[in-house]
Amino acid sequence: MHQPDAYSRRIFIRQGVMLASFAATLPHFIQESALGMLAPDGSATGSRPGVPDERILVIVQLSGGNDGLNTVIPYGDREYHAARPSLSLGEPGKAKNGGAALELDRDRGIGLHPNLTGLKELHDDGRLAVVAGVGYPNPNRSHFASMDIWQSGRPEGKGTGWLGRYVDATCNGNPAADVAVSVGRTAPLAMLGRTSRPIAFESADLFRWLGADAGGQMDAEYQRMVRAGELKDVAAGSQESFLMRTALDAQVTSDRIRAAVKKAPLARYPGSAVAKQLQTVAAMIRDGMKTRVYYVSMGGFDTHANQPNSHGNLMRQLGDAMLAFQNDLKAQGNDGRVMTMCFSEFGRRVRQNASNGTDHGTAGPVFVVGPNVNPGLQGKYPSLTDLDGGDLKFTTDFRGVYQELLGKWMKAPTREVLGGTYQAPSIVRA
């Protein structure tokens, strides 16, 4: 008997699966290119020979343009203090404007922001590399344009993302591997490849089939599909078959992620948003997921006015979260598998503004964390007198940092991913 309000199985497949994620971006969701890469039985090939499947790269994005000069502080440079009479911080042991730098490189007179005690502990333990003066030619001071340049790995800021191209190049477009995960509302450009798409979710609780909340025939068909493996009238190799497998993969991944996150971490995390994101990443690593690239972010770094308190709070959140994450990984026995990079789209201008803040600038520091880094201050710290219209001249091309991480750590074909060869300090231990 015909039921006009009921969804047929085929209508559900064609329309209902498109609602399977809501809060998540599913890998290769409804992509014709992905269909062509699937074997007839739905299996997928693995990574390239020689690519270490066990290694993991974690990216921490600082959105808004972090003030690099008050993060990695040239306290021994008189120009720094002259340019920032009410913002500059003092040398170790001698507070100025409410704070004294934490020693990083005494010979060069450079230290860390006093609230970066977490990073200082990692540095003293040999697990922190600080790359000075990272940027790119012809800098763009727009948040959106500059972030696109960093995330695409290209000076025009267009096309696919550098991490997406890594997945394309090394994982053979494997749609079932879940090799890239972004913990955030949307997937960043950095993770979008020609054929690969990351999983993205803001909260593990939201990464699930939300149709169950409404119930009804659509949910019944979905549950029948993913739980009982029904829908036998679906032709093998068809688009319907692909979507069915996609929904099933999503359900299995969703269940696994939510179960992993429910476990108590092996380190104490602070309550900041970025700490919660890193806690989620650590839980997924502990669970043994196949993911090779994770991406998290924190905002608030656009400090045009009244910078000291807001920037100081951000520095504390960042340092404490990074330390907790590393301690969790170490307690798991996974720290040797993971390398974490922290960047911002640009630094701030050398001189403070009239609002006791700083405006959009250019080059800034990059942090790389893990037991397999060459620790300490790497690269040449930019001159505070030889400026480009009041801004720092970069001394390390950001693509050189990517080259270190992709080539030395992830063992990826860097020319294929980055389109060239770039100079950089030796960040990763051979």
Image: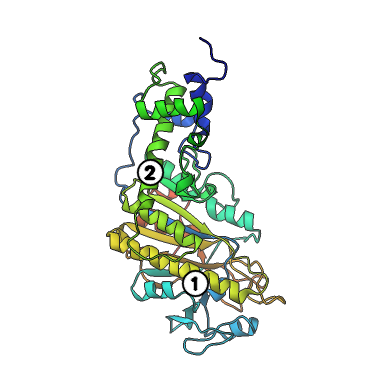
Task: Please report the residue visible at 71 percent of the width from the left and 75 percent of the height from the top.
Answer: 355
**Front-lying residue, 316 or 120:** 316
Nearer to us in this view, 119 or 252: 252
How is colour applied across the structure in the image?
A: rainbow
- Give x and y (percent) for residue 150: 54, 55
Q: Residue at x 42, y 44 (%)?
A: 167
Q: Residue furthest left?
A: 333
Relative vertical location of residue 40 with respect to residue 84 in this rendering, above or below: above
Whether tag 2 and tag 1 are in contact, CB under 8 A, the answer is no
Q: Quadrant of the C terminus?
A: bottom left
Residue 126 sits in quarter: bottom left
Q: Is residue 277 above or below residue 104?
A: above
Inspect the image, locate mark 1, and give the three-letter code of the amino acid beneath it: Arg
The label on residue 316 is 1
Q: Which residue is mark 2?
A: 170
Query: Mark 2 and mark 1: span between their CA atoms?
Result: 36 Å
138 left or right, relative to 240:
right
